[in-house]
Image (spheres, helix red, strand yellow):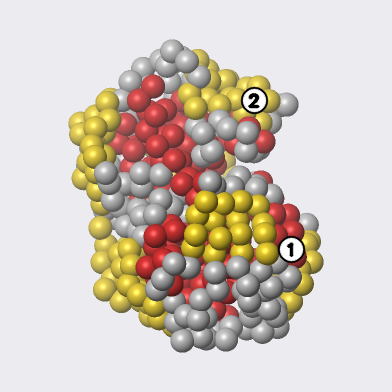
Amino acid sequence: MEITVNPVARLQGRVRVPGDKSISHRAAMIGAIASGRTTIRGFLRADDCLSTLDCLGALGVVIEGDRDLVVIGGKGPRLREPSAPLDAGNSGTTMRLLAGILAGQPFTSEITGDESLRRRPMDRVIEPLAQMGARVEALGDGRCPPLRITGGRLRGVVYRLPVASAQVKSAVLLAGLYGDGTTTVIEPVSTRDHTERMLQLFGARLRREGERISVTPSELTGQQVEVPGDLSSAAFLLAAAAARSGSEVTIVDVGINPTRTGVLEVLAKMGAALEVGNRVERSGEPSATVAVGGRQLKGIRIDGDVVPRVIDELPVIAVIAAVAGGETVISDASELRVKESDRIGTIAAGLRALGADVTERPDGMVIRGGRLRGGRVDAAGDHRVAMAFAVAGLLADGPVTVSGAETIAISFPGFVETVQAVAGGPAVAASR
Ligand code: S3P
């Protein structure tokens, strides 16, 4: 599918975005290994989270529900041996977190994924799970999927993460539920802590002391979980509105977990007017109404500890940096190269094709702000790249056509309609 996005004078409105992807995955997986029923309201029914439900179904978990309600029939810690390889689709979170659970199962299973996922590094989960006693083989060139996992009773370990990755941290903590003692993970920098919060909600014995997180095998009990809107999806609308003077966009009921709000800090530093109100906490996760007012933004430096807290929003931040005043320097973000696409390469090349002045660096990029001309770009099979370029269309001098836009269904069903709602007219045209 191709979408063509036309420039708009301003964005206005009050909208809701679909449920948080990271929290939806975790609620389903932890619900599956808990005893009793778990109901999840606000579940993100997008391709990535559906991959998680499919894998859990193949592991014997009964899943019911309709629209954004999902009911998980928890099986307790032991799942059923699958009769065929599990398919994680495009979802790194599904593969890496499930690897932690599969490492604790007394059977051999295989998990694979689509072409993009089969290029992503899995040695980062293989290494700690092997230390814990599981046998994990990467069947694609030694570090890439498919993974073949022979699990069983595991050893508790103390594991210092070599990369700041919530997925790896989560895989080790989930495997720790099957350990023979305490498992401790030490993070180099704080990353999203949804697994820790969800495990605590389900009754796990989990302790956090600074960058050290410890878990001991615990009985988990099914819960009622409410999932807030996904700040990473809201980010496309917030960033577009922030960069268009005169815009006023409000997103209701969106997650503001402090390990995720780097995008709000970055937008504020670039000069956007932000307001966060109606704060509530549900199912252990904070959410709020976030409003943004558009201004002429300015270029900034983005590096260090904020990077893991804004990692998924850097593609759209790079796009608005291209229409900000002055230079934006993104560094310490080499992890972007191993996401659904090489996001440094795809964003830099696409922005240049749209007329921006961008220099790629191994761990980021330098964007000299000015104007975007418009033109044609490809999503490179990456949902966040597709949506970032759609935002470029709203802010450019001429239309932007994004090919491969069907990938948006990975995380943000209804993206086109939501953009239309705040753009106030037919800003986006889709064609096959
Ligand atoms: C995620 C963690 C991050 C993020 C991804 C979702 C998660 O990946 O980029 O979109 O739900 O745990 P890493 O753990 O590889 O940093």
User: At which x and y percent is residue 329?
Assistant: 71, 72
Tag 2 residue: 138
Name above or below for residue 119 compared with residue 228.
above
Rendered residue at 46%/19% (across/down): 152
Tag 1 residue: 353
| Residue 78 in sight | no
Q: Which amino acid does label 2 sit on?
A: Ala
Residue nearer the viewer, 151 or 10: 10
Rendered residue at 33%/20% (across/down): 60
When asked about the image quadrant of residue 420, the answer is bottom left
User: At which x and y percent is residue 336?
Assistant: 65, 53
Residue nearer the viewer, 71 or 125: 71
User: At which x and y percent is residue 414?
Assistant: 39, 54
Label 1 CB sits under 8 Å from any ligand 1 atom: no
In the visual, does 11 lie left or right of 157? left
Name above or below for residue 103 compared with residue 17.
above
* Numbered label tally: 2
The residue carrying pointer 2 sits among few (fewer than 14), some (14 to 19) or many (20 or more) residues within 10 Å by Cα, namely many
Disc 2 or disc 1, which is closer to the eye?
Answer: 1
Q: What residue type is labelled 1?
A: Ala
Residue nearer the viewer, 376 or 261: 376
When asked about the image quadrant of residue 361, the answer is bottom right
